[in-house]
Image (cartoon, rainbow, N blue to C red):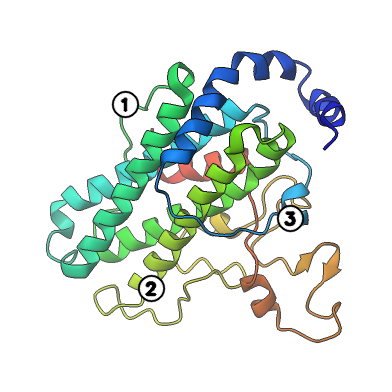
């Protein structure tokens, strides 16, 4: 690893990067210590060319900025599940194994909030006074639709920030910790999608546990659309990886739906924030 080259490239997008890294050294060290202690589920994630894309419209140029961005998303998700479990409109339909699953997901989100808050220390941004999810809890179906949107958006959000952390030199295994959270969010997304297939949620059996093309299944379409720039953050129906059109470019013919389902695409933070603010007041 050529550290001087990394710093040089980082300074091109953030002239004050050295000051930022110096001031945040203690917080990054804390994250490294915590990452060794946390019992978060680990999953092998291929960190290849997909994570080596340009920063695009991501305007988070320091690791602490990325961690505060992740903290905001985790706080949003925790508040969403916590309010759902307390909503009287969901008392009857959200029972049994379904309620247990949502309680487990809520506990995961709280663990993520605790990890990120502890890592940031005094650099942690204050929590919003409230998250207002509007009509999200009006019905069981609407609750699960919002849940799918938040989980799928969260997965894309984490992946979209991997380059920033990696470019900063991945101090104290921050990238590993971020990807461990990313994998858990992906499992949440898959489980919520399974729940939407159940009878209480309307027997929506065409919904798969993974994203096919850019099908929103009733969730806001921008969650599955392209970010900015689209060349760096393509929509979920992207069929090009590593410069190859995978439907025809690797010696066989594949269905676009299969190709799109085999990959998740990252999303820039500006697009993620705009999507979140279109459905949540905070």
- Residue at (86% x, 63% y) in the render: 243
Image depth: mark 3 or mark 1 in front: 3
Label 1, label 2: how far apart the Cα atoms are? 32 Å
Query: Closer to the N terminus: mark 3 or mark 1?
Result: 3
- Relative image position of residue 145 (x, y in whole percent): 38, 62
**Rendered view: 235 above or below 164:** below
What is the spatial separation of the Cα atoms under label 3 and label 1, in whole angstroms? 36 Å
Compared across the picture, whether 99 is left or right of 178 comes to left
| Horizontal and vertical percent position of residue 214 | 60, 67
Give the quarter of the image for residue 77: top left
Residue 135 visible in the shown view: no
Looking at the image, which residue is at 47% across and 43% down? 276
Q: Secondary structure at mark 1?
A: loop
Q: Quadrant of the N terminus?
A: top right
Asked if the residues shown at circle 3 and circle 1 are in contact, with their CB atoms under 8 angstroms apart, the answer is: no
Quadrant of image for the C terminus: top left
Q: Is residue 39 above or below residue 37?
A: below
Residue carrying label 2? 194
């Amino acid at each position: 690893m050529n550290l001087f080259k990394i710093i040089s490239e980082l300074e091109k997008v953030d002239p004050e990067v050295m000051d930022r890294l110096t001031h945040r050294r203690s917080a990054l060290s804390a994250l490294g210590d915590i990452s060794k202690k946390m019992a978060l589920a680990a999953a092998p994630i291929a960190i290849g060319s997909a994570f080596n894309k340009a920063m695009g419209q991501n305007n988070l140029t320091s690791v602490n900025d990325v961690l505060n961005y992740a903290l905001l998303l985790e706080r949003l998700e925790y508040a969403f599940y916590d309010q759902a479990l307390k909503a009287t409109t969901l008392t009857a339909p959200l029972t049994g194994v379904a309620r247990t699953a949502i309680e487990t997901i809520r506990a995961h989100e709280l663990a993520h909030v605790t990890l990120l808050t502890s890592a940031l220390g005094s650099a942690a941004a204050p929590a919003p006074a409230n998250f207002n999810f509007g009509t999200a809890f009006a019905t069981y179906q609407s609750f699960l639709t919002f849940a799918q949107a938040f989980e799928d958006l969260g997965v894309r959000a984490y992946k979209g920030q991997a380059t920033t952390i990696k470019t900063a030199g991945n101090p104290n295994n921050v990238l590993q910790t971020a990807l461990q959270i990313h994998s858990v969010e992906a499992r949440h997304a898959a489980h919520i999608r399974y729940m939407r297939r159940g009878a209480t949620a309307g027997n929506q059996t065409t919904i798969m546990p993974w994203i096919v093309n850019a099908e929103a299944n009733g969730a806001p379409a921008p969650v599955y659309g392209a970010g900015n720039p689209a060349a760096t953050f393509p929509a979920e129906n992207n069929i090009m990886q590593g410069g190859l059109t995978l439907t025809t470019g690797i010696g066989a013919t594949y269905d676009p739906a299969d190709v799109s389902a085999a990959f998740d695409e990252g999303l820039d933070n500006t697009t993620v924030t705009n999507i979140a603010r279109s459905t949540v007041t905070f």
